[in-house]
Amino acid sequence: MTEENIQNKVDVIVIGAGPAGVSAAITVARGGKKVVLVERANAAGAKNMYGGVVYTHAAKEIFPNYEDAPIERYVSKHNYVLLSKDSSTEISYKNTNHNGNAFVTIRAKWDKWCVEQAVKEGVYFAPNTLVNELIVKNGKVCGIRTDVEDYFADVVIIADGVNSLLAKQIGLRKDIKPKNVAMGVKEVIKLPCEVINSRFALSDNQGCAMELAGAPLKDLFGMGIIYTNKDSVAVGIGVSLDDLKEKKLKPYELLDEFKKHPFVAELIEGGEVVEYSAHLIPEGGYNHIPKLYTNGALVVGDAAGLVNNVHFEGTNLAMLSGKYAGETALDALERNDFSENTLCLYKKKLENSFILKDLRTYKDVVQILLGRTSSFLNYYPAKVNEFFEIFTTADGVEKQGKFRKFTKDFFRKRSLAELFKDAVAGIKLIFGVLK
Amino acid sequence: MDKKIEDKLYTLKYKTDSNCHLCPDESKCLQCQEKTCTIICPANVYTYNETEKKLTVSYEKCLECGACRIICKNINWKYPKSGKGVIFKKS
């Protein structure tokens, strides 16, 4: 089969029907061009899992009718929890004026709904289609090789997820290093809607997004999440793959320990595990973004490492990077030029948006925290709990002595060198973000 | 058999591929001291039998995350064929 064979040629092929791929495909279709969205799973969303939420701003931009989607709950409350071995300190944020800016949904349902919308707008969807390799001719990506046949396009948008074997094939990225990726493992635990409402203090369609750090995750670089679905709760952890390797810990055993912490255990008590899942999360940030375009191809979403792990943002970066890639493909079709000279517009769009601006802001955060994991994600969370233990305890003992002991211990039990390093890291974090 | 993980995997649906999509170079496995694949895999796909000196690859349990691929360069790692492998429904 040759490129000249019109039968197998479209304007754009998008590989991967996750949030990034579907957003790219629908953008191209809206521009009136012929686009095929291929997916290796038997249905959109079947290979996808997240520890997260979908952000309203991105959903609205791609799907103005997003409220018709199978949304579980709107995130009306965002909680941050610091855990010590047997206690917890929680900060909860809620604005009663609105229902938050994100919603929780189940990927198998949401991704499927998104593809249905795309199909209605003219995208041709091809499930059960694994792309074995990209076809490159005269230095330009010009198509895809599947088990069945070769297919050709002027522009190929690579949205094949965190592992992105295809971006690697054409040299846009090197293999990911274990320290630049986190292992996410999660369980969906079924509980009656009323029980969830009462345990999380929610009304029927309100939801809670909770991020947790501290003791159950030991000295590992990682955090836990708890998100409320309508009648189930998602409980998961994301932990540096490098740390799991170094400390020889199995991810599912760590998840079990996390679930056993009294704070978590109370929230999921009596629930039945209805699905276990695992997925990698790109953690490299700004410093490890691959080359985003080459002649005839663009990389979007997780495949391009576009995740803001400080804010647990990924779906919105995926959707909007997909949209910008779609717009860039339309521009290239208009000019009939598919070289890097035209496709570099994609990078400019990312640079002008919150996507690369935010990732640049946080570019050193992960590296700084990786060096001080034990302090920031274990020692200080424990100290915060210790402080509140003292602050809230009335036991007939005078307070000043307790505070003095707490302060003394703070300096005595931790070497000055360690405290100094923590302080430097803290300052670097603040200045790194604000400068 | 690790019961904890088997119970978890029992909640999942699979369309099993007829061929194994994870192919470690077994001669290198025998020399490998760490056998990190047996630790980091979230589906316990890799188990090593000390007495038989054999690495078993239960590819049909694979969640296709790619962790083993990143941690070990001796695994010829592919996705299962079109439409095959794990199917998440509630994640």
Image (cartoon, helix red, strand yellow):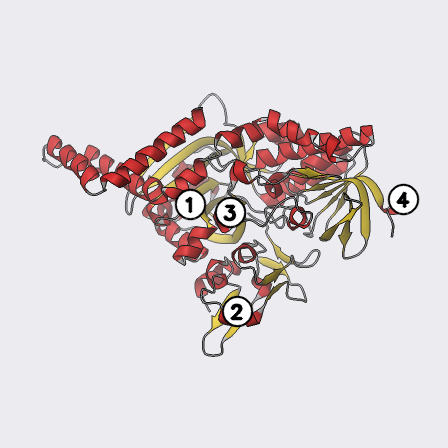
For label 2, the residue is B29
In contact (CB < 8 Å): disc 4 and disc 1? no
Where residue A362 appears, as percent x and y from the top left, is 48, 32
Looking at the rendering, which quadrant does residue A318 occupy? Answer: top right
Looking at the rendering, which quadrant does residue A28 occupy? Answer: top right
Q: Nearer the viewer, mark 4 or mark 2?
A: 2
Q: Nearer the viewer, mark 2 or mark 3?
A: 2
What's under tag 4, amino acid-wise?
Ile
What secondary structure is marked by label 3?
strand
Provide the chain ID for the residue under circle 4: A
What's under tag 2, amino acid-wise?
Cys
**Badge 4, how many Cα within 10 Å: few under 14, some, many 20+?**
few
For label 3, the residue is A181
Where residue A214 appears, as percent x and y from the top left, is 34, 43
How many angstroms separate mark 4 from mark 2 (CA)? 48 Å
Q: Residue at x 9, y 35 (%)?
A: A396
Q: Nearer the viewer, residue A237 or A307?
A: A307
Horizontal placement of A159 versus A28: left or right? Answer: left
Q: Nearer the viewer, residue A270 or A259?
A: A259
